């Protein structure tokens, strides 16, 4: 930073923030012309075309591999019959309920764990043990307890996604700069106010990282739950298609899951940009 | 400002001492400190590093407890931190997730002042420190000097009886520091505040102070209090006057003496 005299009104001192892109047709084409967007589109086209060609001319045995066009046709068929909506809806619902529960419980526990030495002495070691354990292994047990309906999937998703949230949030709370706590104390903040006004906002980037890790695990969790016992869902679709050698339907299910993963990650990144606007923005081209 | 031998005592420090226990042996940091700060006085504590001045200021703020002695603010003994004191931290320690406006309203918010009222008051203070137009900016968008202005405004916002300042300009470059020193004097005079300011820079002490308390190192003792009789307002040119040089050398002499034994 140059030696800007604070006596003169430093009207230009503010770092220029990129304005939101214009929401017009011209704006849309300008977005397409951005290097990052252009490169993503090129790689997508190459991969999809490669898939099609691979299925058509190289791996021609339809029992093991099918070209993209067959998968697209299968997707259309599933969508028209309402089957696709039923499977996607079932999986999505399980992820949404399970994640919502995990976010609420995980953050509440994570904040308490980060702020209380006692609580961490009593429970931290078990959390780390459970975080490292592949909890998908208990999915059959949960299905035994909760049945083949949505409840068991919600349980699997919750169990598998709550630990990264707890651990990430707790470490966020522990990493709060001690100066901020000093400031809060100097201004006479009560312990409650310290948590609500300093620890939680300071830990927010960690909270969002925890949720992002949890999303990936939640998708795995729901599929596993549906494989072990279900009557609907993308995991169920994939599993039953595999059993009946319906390779196009199998790929259709996998494609939907991949899309869900990308969409959820994007949504979370957008949320992150909104919530942590106070962080210096990374330079974009 | 400090015309008053008759002025009321704002802060009264009585026989304050601080000792830490280290592996069985006691380390005395502050030894029997006593002095008074008068209302509307700009009182500067100067001393070498290790003289316990930051510890002393933290005791006044209520962040640390004295091992002995007591402190009265406006006649009442101090117990714990409170909004009757405004603390300006050495590193600005602004909350990066809060805008300038919301950093300034932090203190009033803790006390449950209604939002509208707190914001209106904060806008006034932000304009007093010369930052109007920057209310919606985040700290990372401001220069070091501007962040220290926000730091000052945040302390002002609780309308304290006394401002406690812990080397607030130490991290600034020389030009910004000089500008901020002038600004501080202007703001404090306009708001009519009592200030307890600590620094290790002798010139800064002489430029700002009505009175200077010189601390010695290890353990911190109050060696002498020096009244600065330079007329106000003091422009930067005052540094070239013989009287300024004389006062600087007087303080230097005391600190050198304390090091010599």
Image (cartoon, grey):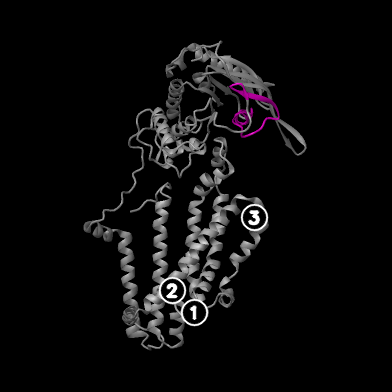
Identity of the residue furthest to the left in this view: A26
Instruction: Report how many numbered discs are placed on residues in the image.
Output: 3
**Taking B180 as reference, is A236 above or below it?**
below
- The CA distance from mark 2 to mark 1 is 10 Å
Q: SS at mark 3?
A: helix
> Dots 2 and 1: beta carbons under 8 Å?
yes
Residue under label 3, please give it. Answer: A120
Q: Are marks 1 and 3 in contact (CB under 8 Å)?
A: no
Q: Residue at x 39, y 35 (%)?
A: A2
**Is residue B151 visible in this depiction of the protein?**
yes
Q: Position of residue A196 (x, y in %)?
A: 53, 46
Residue B66 painted magenta = yes
Depth check: give the residue in front, B56 or B177. Answer: B56
What is the crowding at mark 3: few (fewer than 14 residues within 10 Å), some, or many (at least 20)?
A: some
Q: Secondary structure at mark 2?
A: helix
Image-based side of B201 in relation to B182, left or right: right
Which residue is the site of mark 1? A230
Residue A90's disc is: 2
**Left or right for B90, reference A49:** right
Residue at x-position 39% and y-position 57%? A270
Judge the density around disc 1: few (<14), some (14-19), many (≥20) Cα neighbours within 10 Å: many
Which contiguous range is marked in magenta? B50-76
Mark 2: give few (<14), some (14-19) or many (20+) Cα within 10 Å.
Answer: many
Disc nearest the viewer among 3 and 2 = 2
Q: Does residue B118 sit above or below A113 in this rendering?
A: above
């Amino acid at each position: 930073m140059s030696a800007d005299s604070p006596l003169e009104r430093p009207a230009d001192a503010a770092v220029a923030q990129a304005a939101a892109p214009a929401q017009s047709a011209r704006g849309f084409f300008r977005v397409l012309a951005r290097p990052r967007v252009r490169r993503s589109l090129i790689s997508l086209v190459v991969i999809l075309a490669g898939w099609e060609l691979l299925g058509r001319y190289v791996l021609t045995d339809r029992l093991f591999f099918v070209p993209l066009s067959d998968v697209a046709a299968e997707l259309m068929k599933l969508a028209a019959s309402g089957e696709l909506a039923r499977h996607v809806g079932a999986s999505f619902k399980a992820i949404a309920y399970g994640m919502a529960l995990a976010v609420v419980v995980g953050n509440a526990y994570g904040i308490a764990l980060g702020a209380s030495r006692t609580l961490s002495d009593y429970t931290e070691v078990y959390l780390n043990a459970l975080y490292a354990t592949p909890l998908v292994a208990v999915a059959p047990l949960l299905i035994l307890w909760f049945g083949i309906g949505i409840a068991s999937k919600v349980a699997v998703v919750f169990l598998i996604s709550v630990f990264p949230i707890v651990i990430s949030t707790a470490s966020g709370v522990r990493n709060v700069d001690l100066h901020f706590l000093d400031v809060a104390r100097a201004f006479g903040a009560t312990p409650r106010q310290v948590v609500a006004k300093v620890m939680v906002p300071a830990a927010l980037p960690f909270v969002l990282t925890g949720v992002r890790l949890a999303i990936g695990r939640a998708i795995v969790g729901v599929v596993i739950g549906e494989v072990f016992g279900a009557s609907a869902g993308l995991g169920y679709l994939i599993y039953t298609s595999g059993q009946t050698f319906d390779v196009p339907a199998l790929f259709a299910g996998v494609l939907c899951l991949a899309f869900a993963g990308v969409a959820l990650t994007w949504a979370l990144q957008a949320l992150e940009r909104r919530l942590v606007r106070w962080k210096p923005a990374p330079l974009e081209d | 400002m400090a015309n008053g031998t008759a002025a009321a005592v704002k802060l009264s420090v009585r026989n304050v001492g601080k000792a830490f226990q280290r592996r069985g042996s006691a380390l005395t940091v502050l030894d029997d400190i006593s002095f008074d700060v008068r209302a509307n006085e700009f009182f500067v504590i100067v001393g070498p590093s290790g003289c316990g001045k930051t510890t002393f200021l933290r005791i006044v703020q209520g962040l640390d407890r004295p091992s002995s002695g007591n402190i009265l603010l406006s006649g009442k003994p101090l117990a714990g931190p409170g909004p009757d004191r405004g603390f300006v931290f050495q590193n600005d320690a602004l909350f990066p997730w809060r805008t300038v406006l919301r950093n300034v309203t932090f203190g009033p918010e803790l006390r449950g002042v209604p939002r509208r009222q707190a914001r209106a008051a904060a806008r006034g203070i932000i304009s007093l420190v010369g930052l109007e137009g920057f209310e919606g900016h985040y700290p990372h968008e401001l220069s070091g000097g501007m962040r220290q202005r926000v730091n000052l405004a945040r302390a002002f916002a609780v309308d304290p009886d006394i401002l406690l300042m812990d080397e607030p300009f130490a991290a600034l470059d020389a030009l910004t520091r000089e500008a901020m020193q002038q600004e501080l004097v202007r703001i404090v005079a306009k708001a009519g505040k009592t200030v307890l300011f600590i620094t290790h820079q002798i010139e800064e002490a002489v430029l700002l102070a009505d009175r200077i308390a010189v601390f010695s190192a290890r353990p911190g003792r109050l060696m002498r209090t020096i009244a600065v009789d330079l007329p106000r307002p003091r422009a930067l040119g005052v540094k070239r006057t013989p009287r300024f040089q004389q006062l600087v050398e007087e303080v230097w002499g005391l600190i050198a003496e304390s090091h010599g034994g």
